Image (spheres, rainbow, N blue to C red):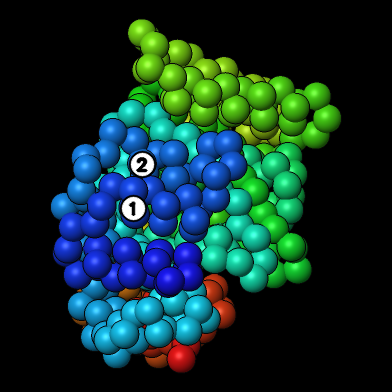
Amino acid sequence: MKPINQVALTHWAMLNGKGVPKEDFIFSCYFIHGDHKGSVADNLTRNLKEEIQDSLLHRHPKAAQLIQYWSPYFLKPEATPAADATRFILDVYNSMEDVEALFSDQITPGVTRAVKDSISDLFFKRPHTKIGWTLQLTTSGKGSFNCIRQQLITEPGDLTLLSPDALYDYRREESAEEWTHIWIYFPADKGLLEWLKWPEVGPNIYHLNTQGDDFAALQQLFESVIENFKGNLPFVDQLARNLLEQILIRCRQLAPDGQQGVMDPRISNAVTFISHNFDRPFTVNDLAEEVGLSPARLSTLFKQQTGTSVLRWRDERRMARASQLLVQTQQAINKVAELVGYTDPLYFTRCFRQHLGCSPRDFRAQSRSHSIEP
């Protein structure tokens, strides 16, 4: 049996809730994710029992749908064409939306390498709210992030920071042959929040660019976190925390002057008010009265300190929440519109299309359908 068919069969068994031998699981992980330094496979294959009795795949939210579609292909798994085995694996991973079970409350690093036209070329679409933050450093190639406000293309030296409420929707940029990024997942911690004041490029998505010595120093620190994670020495958690703090402090030093300065407390109050009330109808005048500024002064300061307008800021958060509701729930589109603050479903659809490039109905269909078409 070809390796790709063996890997597909292992995943088929896990998807159906069947146990698989430890060696088959390990082989599959490294086949898909690669054996490069810091591979996700390193994390997935730690401290395994001789047989994997339970897996994230069995709890995959789309397991039943995937099983129904792919059952005919596994009647004779050894005869399944390699191309179909590849499509099956990509379909499983690209439709996976909930990966929280892979993480705990500890700092977890890894290196993801996506190569064009290979089985590693996965895209990541995680609409659910997360427990922690994810920090990424692109080291080679190009990545593409859907930030609602814009499409962010990252190159070597670019850092992205995704908050627990961010819409995770990213992949290798189409024109690039590959994309490699080092990432660190870390729990939300009030002690770290002071260093997370970066320029926002989309709702709850932040970006910095580094070059030269700064890039080299940060890459070395990221790699040190990975080396520490692999070790089994005393004080591993404390050292990981120390290294992460060094990374975040260096990033804070690199933030533009406007981000390093303390935000006007009235604008900070306005941002907090919008975050908690974006689903309610309010005007710039209402918000100005709430924070004690004239409407004109509020608009000017808000634009200076956030880079966008009050209503644009509110609408971006509405769209991010609507995207989550469309995937996570069975709510009718008019109900989703109502839940994020729109009384007119047609107007909501127009706004959604402006921000995300497709209708709410198409967005839901794309997120819930097979990512690899037959």
- At x 70%, y 58%, the residue is 178
Q: Residue furthest front?
A: 1
In the figure, residue 233 lies in which quadrant?
top left
Please state if 345 lies on the left or on the right of 16 as rendered.
right
Foreground pick, 106 / 178: 178
Residue named by callout 2? 45
Position in image of residue 35 (x %, y %) = 55, 44
Residue at 39%, 66% (x, y): give it.
6
Which element type, helix, strand or loop, lies under badge 1? helix
Q: Is residue 187 above or below residue 72?
A: above
- Residue 148 percent coordinates (x, y): 54, 65
Q: Do the residues under discs 1 and 2 have CB atoms within 8 angstroms?
A: yes
Residue 243 lies, with reference to residue 360, above or below; the image says: above
Disc 1 designates what residue?
25
Residue type at mark 1?
Answer: Phe
Q: What element does badge 2 sit on?
A: loop
Q: Quick one: quadrant of the N terminus? A: bottom left
Q: Amino acid at mark 2?
A: Thr
Instruction: Indicate the position of residue 196 as horizontal and vertical percent values.
Output: 51, 32
Residue at image point 43% right, 19% down: 231
Q: Depth check: 244 or 250 in front?
A: 244
The one of 13 and 200 positioned closer to us in this rendering: 13
Q: Mark 1 or 2 closer to N-term?
A: 1
Q: In the visual, does 48 lie left or right of 291?
A: left
